[in-house]
Image (cartoon, grey):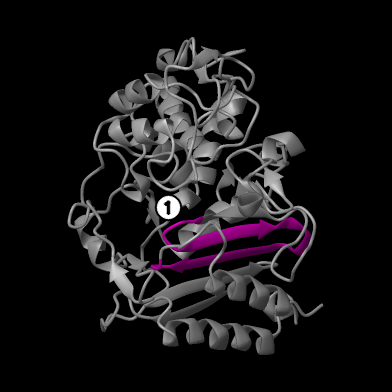
Amino acid sequence: MSDSGGLSRTGLDRMREVLGRAVERGEVPGLVALVHRRGRTHVVTVGTTEAGGDTPMSRDTIFRIASLTKPITAVAAMVLIEECRLRLDDPVDDLLPELADRRVLRRPDGPLEDTVPAERPVTVRDLLTFRLGIGAIFAPPGTYPIQRALADACVDRGPDGPSSGPDEWIKRLGALPLVRQPGTAWMYHTSADVLGVLVARVAGRPYEEFLRERVLAPLGMDDTGYHLPAASLGRLAASYLTDPETGALVRRADVRDGAWDRPPAFPSGGGGPSLLSTADDYLAFCRMLLNKGRHDGGRLLSRPAVELMTTDHLTPAQKAGNEIFLGSGGWGFGIAVDGGRDDLATRPGRFGWTGGLGTTAYTDPAEDLVGVLMTQGAMTSPRPPRVFQDFWTSAYAAIDD
């Protein structure tokens, strides 16, 4: 069906029905789903912007996109790499002296004072591939001394982010040892936050200003940013957690509730606090990657830069222990890259990521397809929730050629 971008009407209707059932079951109060293929975009909106509310979800509803911020930060860094203001294998010591002369824990669960010298400096490539040597540690809180130290320093504050500014944040991070030697292991999240600080220092201005001028504005992502104009605040969807005992949705105690009209202390490159965005804005970002760096107004990145970003750069040893995140795939620059096809919701070469507050977006060059799903329900584990799986299954099942 050429007028539907090769997506069947029956399949798209099924997607609406399946996603509607997720709202009926109370898994999320509402959602916006978008599938784009061969120049045609199909949108599903279901539910309301608040649990029990009467404001319906709409195509321009604004969401906290959490870790969907990470690929955008990687693109900002690639802009500077193409201008030769950053180089992939240069140490970051000159720009981030807080990370120079690192010490590394002799073992991840060991005492903070039991360290050895880093075998080499941290590089820009390490940050883009999440091989900095420190990041999220997925164990019960307080299990390891380094976890307690990260919490005590307010370095790791989850989706709400730290209360300190970028310079103070990286100073506190730099006072702690690395968990792994630079370049040896993929560790989630923290590299993206460091990358945002690095971009700001290279640009010589706040990260959000550079991001707005060089990435968001050229792509027409007018509803994307770390804060909102007063006129847009009414379009921001509420955010919810799931009570582990009852399964009921509980509104998040968001430290920024009521403060989204002004910038955060720390504009996070990794998503804590995240960018705010809409499904259509994020589609514009994904379409740029799908089109190898081109967008409606010109070119943001070169084709080789996008190809480099969306190539798996991890060895099996660097992926080890992260299969629950990466599955059979790997990691490019700030973005996951699918490996083998092991179910209907994945495809080799597809790239994208998910956001822990309930968002997912992937681009599939082989199918000329982009999918974006935005919900307000926070993930309860690293495994995708059922509504994510159903969205991707429905999107691929709708292909009709």
Q: Residue 43: percent from the left, percent from the top?
A: 53, 76
Residue visible at 48% across and 81% down in the picture? 22
Please state which of residues 299 and 62 is positioned toward the viewer in this rendering: 62
Question: On the rendered structure, is 344 left or right of 238?
Answer: right
Quadrant of the rendered structure where residue 3 is? Answer: bottom right
Q: Residue 79: percent from the left, percent from the top?
A: 55, 32
Q: Residue 40: percent from the left, percent from the top?
A: 63, 71
Residue visible at 30% across and 64% down in the picture? 236
Please state which of residues 164 and 351 is positioned toward the viewer in this rendering: 164
Q: How many marks?
A: 1
- Residue 239 versus residue 86 in the image, above or below: below
- Residue 48 versus residue 351 in the image, above or below: below
Quadrant of the rendered structure where residue 41 is? Answer: bottom right
Main SS category, magenta section = strand
Question: Is residue 41 at least partly visible in the picture?
Answer: no
Q: Which residues are magenta?
A: 355-377
Question: On the rendered structure, is 253 left or right of 171?
Answer: left
Question: On the rendered structure, is 2 left or right of 161?
Answer: right
Quadrant of the rendered structure where residue 53 is? Answer: bottom left
- Label 1 sits on a secondary structure element that is helix
- Residue 13 versus residue 151 in the image, above or below: below
- Considering the image in quadrants, where does the C terminus appear? bottom right
Q: Which residue is mark 1?
A: 66
Question: Is residue 107 at least partly visible in the picture?
Answer: yes
Q: Mark 1 belongs to which amino acid?
A: Ala
